[in-house]
Every structure is written in structure tokens, then in C-alpha cells.
Image: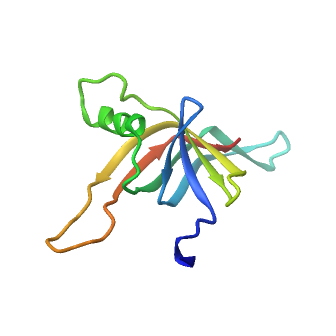
Amino acid sequence: MEGNVVNNQWHVELDDCRVETLKSVSGVSFTQEYTQLLQNSPDGKPVPDVLGTPDFSGTLTLTRSMDKSDKFTQWIMDFRDPTKTEGSAQTFTLAYVNAQNNEVKRLQFEDVRVSNWSGPGLAAGDSGEVEETLELTFVSCDPV
């Protein structure tokens, strides 16, 4: 029974509403690129400066188990359908909660898009849990 104890969980929130509990969240990463511009001061000393705003992008991977919400599933399906305008990038929030369901951390991702989806792989005779993997790209990530 001890193997079934839930200590911490990640929850998906869309439109400020908790819609799904995830099996795992991994690969949260982002990059920032700057263009450095070197100029000279009036007395001839080099003055480094940053040109423009940073180029920021990131990815994260979500693993969904059998407990899938209709709203989150529809959000994913809208990205796969090129005729849907609802599939445009939007705000996406992950809430990390402890065993008492108290929020420990919240991360808000802006301009989120589905970049890769992997369905469940089942073989004859398997009795494992059915899960799917979803990779998302985002433009910014902020703790809230």
C-alpha cells in the first residue's frame, strides 16, 4: 500500500481553473540569446551594450495518465486541427502541490503551443498504465 501514497503532484490550469493532475512534468528548459554590441565611450573606452530584447523560448514535457480531463484534451486536439482558431497559443499554468493539496509553487507559461504528442504504446498482453506524452513550447515562464 505504501507504493500508492501520493506525496506531490502537478496540476494543469487553463483559464484559472484546475483541469487535470499530471503523472509527471519533466524537461522544463529555456534559452535566452542576446546580441552584444560594443561601442566606445567619448574617452575611447569600450562600453558593452545589449542590442534589442532577448530571444527567449522554452520547452516542457508533460506525461498524462488515464485520468484525462475533457477540457485539456480538447485544448490539445484544437492544436492538431489547422481549421481551429482556438488552437492559438495561450496562457498555461502548472501548480505544484504537496500531499495536503497545498500549493508549493506555480509557474505560468505564456504563448504555449503543442509541439509534439506521443500516444500510448500498448502491446498484446500488456497490463501497464496507458499514458501519453505531450511536449509544449512557450515564449515565457514566470513564477506566480
Q: Quadrant of residue 62?
A: bottom left
Q: Nearer the viewer, residue 40 or 118?
A: 118
Residue shown at 53% from the left, 76% from the top: 3
Residue shown at 67% from the left, 46% from the top: 106
Residue shown at 67% from the left, 43% from the top: 50
| In this picture, residue 109 sits left or right of residue 78 | right
Q: Quadrant of the C terminus?
A: top right
Question: Which percent across, then down, holds residue 110?
Answer: 55, 36
Quick check: 127 above or below 23? below
Residue farthest toward the bottom in the current orientation of the protein = 2
| In this picture, residue 54 sits left or right of residue 90 | right
- Applied colour scheme: rainbow
Q: How many marks?
A: 0
Q: Nearer the viewer, residue 133 or 112?
A: 133
Q: Quadrant of residue 13?
A: top right
Residue farthest toward the front in the current orientation of the protein = 1
Question: Which percent across, then down, holds residue 121?
Answer: 23, 64
| In this picture, residue 9 sits left or right of residue 112 | right
Residue farthest toward the right in the current orientation of the protein = 43
Quick check: 85 above or below 32? above
Question: Which percent across, then down, holds residue 142?
Answer: 66, 43
Quick check: 21 above or below 130? above
Residue shown at 29% from the left, 24% from the top: 84
Question: Which percent across, then down, holds residue 82?
Answer: 24, 29
